[in-house]
Amino acid sequence: MEVKKAKREKLKVPIMITGASGSGKTVSALLIAKGIVEKMYPDLSDEEQWLKIGVIDTEHKRALLYAGSTVAGVYIGEFLHLDFEPPYTVNNYIQAFRLMKAEGIEVVIIDSISHAWSGEGGILEQVESFTKGNSSKNMQAWAKVKPLEKEFLKLVTGNSVYVVATSRSKQAYDFDKDEKGKTKIVKMGLKPDQKDALEYEFAIALRMDQDHIAEA
C-alpha cells in the first residue's frame, strides 16, 4: 500500500448498457464506441475509425443490421464482427475477446453478457449440471463456478481496452407482507439478466427505456 496524490488518469473504462428488447442497446453501444474512437484517433478516416470497433455478437448477428445505416445523424460504417454461437462459456467469451484484441480493436462491444449467465453453457446451466437436481449440492456447485465468475468479471471490467457490454433486462420480483401479514410477491421493475449487482462493477451503467432514452 502506498498513499499518493490523486491525479486524473486516462482510464479505459468499462460501460454497461441494460434494457429490454428493442430499447436500443446495440445501436447505442455502437454510437458510444464511435465517439470513443473519434477522441482517441481524430486523424483517422471515418472508415478506419470504425475498424477500431469490434462486436462480439450473441444475438444472432443482429448487430449487422446497423452496418451501413445512419442513426441519429451518425453513419455506422463497417465494424469488425464476431458471430458468437453457443455454448456461452466463460472460456469461449475469453477466446472471443482475445481474437478481437488480436485485430487491434480499441473498443470491444459484448452484445450481450446475459448469455454468459443464463444462456446455453452459461453460469446457471453449469451450476445446474453440478447439482443434477439435488438442491443440497447447490452451495457446492456455486463454489465450483465461483472462479469462472471472477474470470468473467476480470474480462469485462479490465482496462486493456474499452468494453461496452449490453445486458438484457428481466422482471425482478421480491417478497413483501400485505396488511394481513400474508406474504405476497411484488414486482420490483426491470433488472439486468446477469449476476445481482454486477452493474456496480462498471464505471458507467446506463439503463435504456423503450423510448430509447438512457438513464445513468
Image (tube, rainbow, N blue to C red):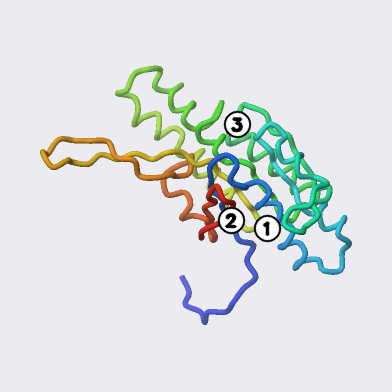
> Which label lies toward us, 3 or 2?
2
Q: Secondary structure at mark 1?
A: helix
Quick one: 215 or 112, which is closer to the camera?
215
Query: CA–CA distance between discs 1 and 3?
Result: 25 Å
Q: Residue at x 49, y 26 (%)?
A: 125
Q: Position of residue 180 (x, y in %)?
A: 10, 38
> Which label lies toward us, 2 or 1?
1
What residue occupies the far top of the structure in this picture?
A: 133
Residue at image mark 3:
88
Query: CA–CA distance between discs 2 and 1?
Result: 9 Å
Residue at image mark 1:
32
Quick one: 197 or 153, which is closer to the camera?
197
> Which label lies toward us, 1 or 3?
1
Residue 11, by quadrant, is bottom right
What residue occupies the far front of the structure in this picture?
A: 211
Mark 3 or 2, nearer chain start: 2
Mark 1 or 3, nearer chain start: 1
Residue at image mark 2:
15
Mark 2 or 1, nearer chain start: 2
Q: Secondary structure at mark 3?
A: loop
Q: Secondary structure at mark 2?
A: strand
Q: Amino acid at mark 1?
A: Ile
10 Å crowding of disc 1: few (<14), some (14-19), many (20+):
some
Q: Residue at x 52, y 82 (%)?
A: 5
Q: Amino acid at mark 3?
A: Tyr
Residue 196, by quadrant, is top left
| Vertical comparison of 87 with 103: above or below | above
Q: How many marks?
A: 3
> Do callouts 2 and 1 mark residues in contact (Cβ within 8 Å)?
yes
Q: Position of residue 164 (x, y in %)?
A: 63, 52
| Vertical comparison of 153 with 170: above or below | below
Whether residue 187 sits left or right of residue 110 in the image: it is left
